[in-house]
Image (cartoon, helix red, strand yellow):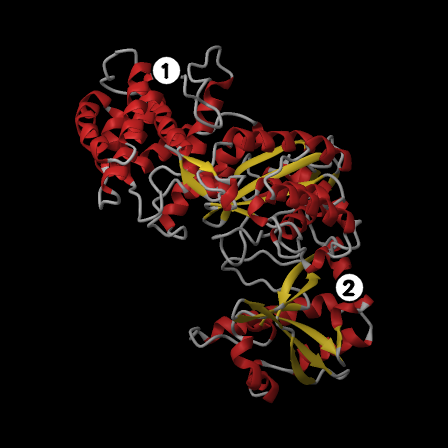
Amino acid sequence: MILSSLYNYYQIVCDDPESGIARPGYSTQLIGYALNLSEQGELLGIFPLFSSVTNGKKVREIPRRMAVPELVKRSVNVSANYMWDNAAYVLGLADKETKDDAYAQTRFDAFRQHNLKILSTAKSPVAIAVMAFLNRYDRKTLSEHPAIIRHQDGLVTNANLVFQVNGKFALDDLEIRLAWERFLSGQESKKMQCLVTGEFEPVTRLHPDIKGVRDSQAKGASLVSFNLDAFTSYGKEKGENAPVSQRVASGCGVAINYLLSSENPNRKIYLGDTTVIYWAENSNPAYARTFSTLINPAFLGDEPQSNDLGRKDAEDLMRKIAVKLQKGQAIDTDALKQDLDPETRFYVLGLAPNAARLSVRFFLNEPFGRFIERIMLHYADMAIQKEFVNQPEYITPYRILAECVSPKVSRRDEEVKASWGLMSGALMRSILNGTPYPEGLYTAYLNRIRHDSDEKDKSIKINYTRAAVIKACLLRKYRRQAQNPYKEVLQMSLNETYTNPAYVLGRLFAVIEKAQHEAIGEVNAGIKDKYFNSACATPASTFPTLMRMTHHYTSKAEYGNSLDHRIQDLMDLLEARPFPSRLTLDEQGIFVLGYYHQRANFYVKNADKDGEAEPSN
């Protein structure tokens, strides 16, 4: 299903002149230098093909992306590309760390033999010039050439090289391209029925390498591979175990590498160790741009990328959505679907590194309109009263995962990425399928609440995001059950009539905390740091102590009488029942929500102060 979807997308994108995607038998690679030859095959000079890109205060040199003959599959084997490769193959140059002289010699010889064999069928002056170069030079003469000495440091750092003849790229020559295509069609390969097209064609032995998945090998990793006898069937070799034609395998490789590259105008989404790509079964780029904007509002307001210019319809649609989201306005999904066909098939693929292979974290495909509805349902479930007006309206999947780890730990930490691995896939599936969020997410949030402490002027232990996720997890958990005992509290804001003990006790804790703050101001360790965890899990052992402390606080607080009345009202909601000896995990989440709702309710918008908040007593 994945390969079929990718090949269909490849065929669609091939018809889009703006995509710049490589044709069958070719791939897009980063090229650093061009060897400029005379018609007699003499090396005239070397032209760098880098462009400067400014990123903040840093300036980086980026190699040029070019369509070149398809990359060969190699790990430790010696195998040369056609008309392009790195300096070890093209020039016989190796870096200083490579002390084995045979390393570069064997690669140089392989490149020379492979290219002379293919070029022997081409008769153009450009092809003759390249063949003359390959026959004319050896490793020693090349290493002493002034142009190579001048650029040697850059050449040996894995920069790829191509040929030019009199300043024109050799790969633009028709005879050179035809020679490559004749070579491809003449390759010996077993014919079998392709699993994607159903046609009997030469099948690929090795699938193309996939580049661009974060933390995977730089040379690329395999999406489909068979490297041990345990994975084979009835003596079949490599790709014959799951026969896919060379044509389809090449198209799938080009498509997925394009989706993972910077050439793709739609940003990749990173969730832990998972790289998420997405595409529509339609050439209109607005589908993918809409999905990207909705699933990750952190990108809102960005100026269109340079390679997006000219796609006016998609840009206008994105600006409309961005303006609404930034102003906190609801998105009219019905109006959105009038611009885009909701029945268009849409695909979301999550990939993660796994040694020399790629793991598929998830692969989802649904009509586009259904994805929109489920994403908006996710945001509706997450909606909760804000404590501050500058808090985000829409909580992104990345922000949800970020709150699963301590704020003192770097998001780049390897342990953090590992902990996010399976969780990120499960979270994305739950969002796009409209199913309950993973149980591990809920318990991770409760664990963080137990272990974290607030910082000065910053609430970390129980903040806007954590309260929203706990509310959403419980809401989805009970949505499809016959009875929902917490229906009245799983809402945006405070429910002052709800009598569930866990919710009332959470509210009560928030009022006691406020009484402490009113009485003695800021302290190094307040009652939340000392008592919140035990109050949340075992109220019967904690609240009697808190109630005794309360009388001391209210007697000193400026609005002590008002706080006393609040506390008495909450005790009345408990209906003289004893404090529970313990609370279940679900009830602990309700306790957290009660605390958050009550604390958020202490602050009301003051229109006379331009949206600033002031306490209400």
Q: How far separated are the C-alphas under marks 1 and 2?
A: 77 Å
Q: Residue at x 73, y 39 (%)?
A: 281
Splitting the image into 4 quarters, where does residue 446 fall?
top left
Instruction: Tell me residue 300's x, y (percent).
Output: 60, 48
Quadrant location of the N terminus? top right
Instruction: Tell me residue 69's x, y (percent).
Output: 69, 61
Q: Which residue is mark 1?
A: 499
The count of marks equals 2
Seen from the viewer's position, the closer of residues 333 and 164 is: 333
Query: Is there a contact, CB below 8 Å, between mark 1 and mark 2?
Result: no
Can see residue 171? Answer: yes
Seen from the viewer's position, the closer of residues 261 and 608 is: 608
Disc assigned to residue 370: none
Q: Which of label 1 and label 2 is nearer to you?
A: 1
Q: Is residue 58 left or right of residue 265?
A: left
| Local SS, label 1 | loop
Disc assigned to residue 177: 2
Given the image, on which type of amino acid does mark 1 rest? Thr
Given the image, on which type of amino acid does mark 2 rest? Arg
Q: Relative to 162, is 613 above or below?
A: above
Q: Is residue 476 left or right of residue 72?
A: left
Splitting the image into 4 quarters, where does residue 42 fall?
bottom right
Instruction: Tell me residue 549's x, y (percent).
Output: 18, 30
Label 2 environment density (alpha carbons within 10 Å; few <14, some 14–19, many ≥20): some
Name the N-terminal-most of marks 1 and 2: 2
| Local SS, label 2 | helix
Q: Residue at x 63, y 59 (%)?
A: 71
Quadrant location of the C terminus? top left
Instruction: Tell me residue 163's x, y (percent).
Output: 69, 74
Label 1 environment density (alpha carbons within 10 Å; few <14, some 14–19, many ≥20): some
